[in-house]
Amino acid sequence: MIKFATSIRLGVVKKETVSPAYNGLKAYMQFVVNKLYYRRYFSLDRKNIPPEGTSFLIVSNHQNCLNDAFGIFFAFPDRRIRFIARADVFSIHPLVTRLLHRAGVMPAYRMQYQGEEALPKNEQTFQETEENLLSGHPVLLFPEAGHQPRRWLGTFAFGYTRMAFAAAEQSGFRKEVFILPACNHYSDYFAFRSDMLVRFGKPVSIQPYYELYKTKPRTAQREVNKLVREQIREMMLDIRDLEHYDDIDFLRQSSFGVRFSRSAGLDSRSLPQKLEADKELVSLLEQKKVSYGTVRELREKLENLGLEEGQLENPPSLLRTAMEALLLLSTLPLAIVGLWPYLFVRLIPKHFTRKLQDPMLYGSYAMVVLILGLPMAFLLTVALEWPFVGAWALLHACLLPLLFVFEVYWLSLGRRTLRDFRFHHAGRRTVRDLKEQRNLTFERIRKELDI
Amino acid sequence: MINPALIQQLNAAIADEFEVEEQALVADAPIQETLELDSLSLVDLVAVIENVTGVKLKGMDVKQIQTFGALYSFIGENL
């Protein structure tokens, strides 16, 4: 058992000094993730983050592995936060293990991954977390005990409430411990230059439950968990109808969802506003028990033809498609240059994701490869090109981040142009039939929803 | 087959440990939802079962069991 210093037990905390190296590294990571990887990053309701020195755990939904952790990490610009992560990342390589410890990451052992016999090892993490809490160092964890493959909220394991109450107990119940609910949301899990948001709920004080905890610890934990989970659920997009998940997702992303946003006075191009509109739409769809047969049919037809619903809403003209193709061809040399280092950032994560058979890990790998790969690509570019082009190599190396962004947009335009070609190839009759089917389907759903 | 008196004793111990009403622990009640089990409390459940019945079960085995009725049968088979 770790013995806490008296100052910690009584909750006397000093402001934590963050080293310039830590801040520098964080600033670099923030640039790569928030400026290159994402198009836009939103951190909302940061006013809810308790002031420095407060004992609090940050608890969030979990869908996109490392991206979720980074999203919350960057919302704390001048503070250090600690993390609890699945224990298997500690066994990748001894160097990774050391780095994780230095970064304040603690392992969580789970029955389904590490086996029952590994569970007692969690005691060390629990004690370190309690110590951190009493020292006023926030700790982030994801109580769903694994990431979800979709936009929905799983059940919570009670490890976090145990740690919060145990920390309070260590202080003789004199220290007020909080749980800060947080939510992550993405416009697209897998695409570069997509949007991400993190939102913070109102901190939940567990102090009102101290007396209950003394006699009924599990009941106190359940009550706190109910409050925290409900706050997270209210902030996020939680599609509970898993049977019709793909149909609901299709509707919210289609022109139906865009119109719904507009009618609610919300801008679907802004992720925070789109999230609010989507939450309202999903809640309405689940309440009214809409029938999704024709939605599925339409969705599958579009998928089979390689088309998108948006093309029925705004059909691409032949002239526009030709202009796009011309633009792509004229910028092809730059796109070839931009393949370095884009190709590695794309292919390495794909390889590992396929190997681990978990598509939700793609974002994590891509982020890590981008963060580590950029400085390496910079050095390699200078080293390989300098003998041939001299100082121009330095210019090329400095432009790598811009080339990466260019490559993402060039390929995205390429995919869109291909889709537009498919649209023209499908023929007027097919498009007319699809449009008619879509209009009838959307009209029927509008009636069913009474909107 | 597990003795009804042992079931009663086990239910009392589970209700006490997990702070739930004993009446909720009926044969067709789902274990996970009724006790709000996570992997750590699953270990606690295994310990309660062992204390009352002397049967040492594996957490992973108990995790697969859906209802209290199935749990009692499983314990009965291992008595």
Image (spheres, rainbow, N blue to C red):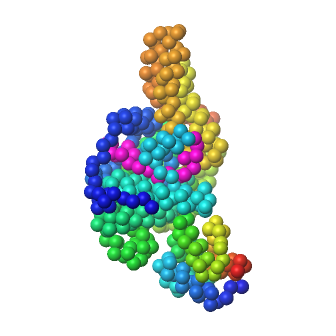
Residue A159 image position (x, y, % from top left): 47, 63
Is B1 on the left or on the right of A223, as rendered? right
In which quarter of the view is residue A291 placed? bottom right
Q: Residue at x 38, y 48 (%)?
A: A81
Q: Residue at x 44, y 65 (%)?
A: A162
Count every numbered label the image shows and give the total.
0
| Residue farthest to the bottom, as pictured | B5
Is B65 on the left or on the right of A438, as rendered? right
Foreground of the two, A214 or B22 = A214
Q: Residue at x 63, y 73 (%)?
A: B66
Question: Can residue A273 be seen from the camera position used here?
Answer: no
Residue B69 image position (x, y, % from top left): 64, 81
Q: Is residue A353 above or below residue A199?
A: above
On-image quarter of the C terminus of chain A: bottom left
Q: Residue at x 71, y 77 (%)?
A: B78
Q: Is residue A407 above or below residue A253?
A: above
Foreground of the two, A445 or A365 = A365
On-image quarter of the N terminus of chain A: bottom left
Residue A306 image position (x, y, % from top left): 61, 41
Is A168 covered by the magenta stretch? no
Is A82 covered by the magenta stretch? yes
Foreground of the two, A89 or A405 = A89
Residue A358 image position (x, y, % from top left): 60, 48
Magenta-drawn segment = A73-93
In which quarter of the view is residue A195 placed? top left
Question: Can residue B9 be seen from the camera position used here?
Answer: yes
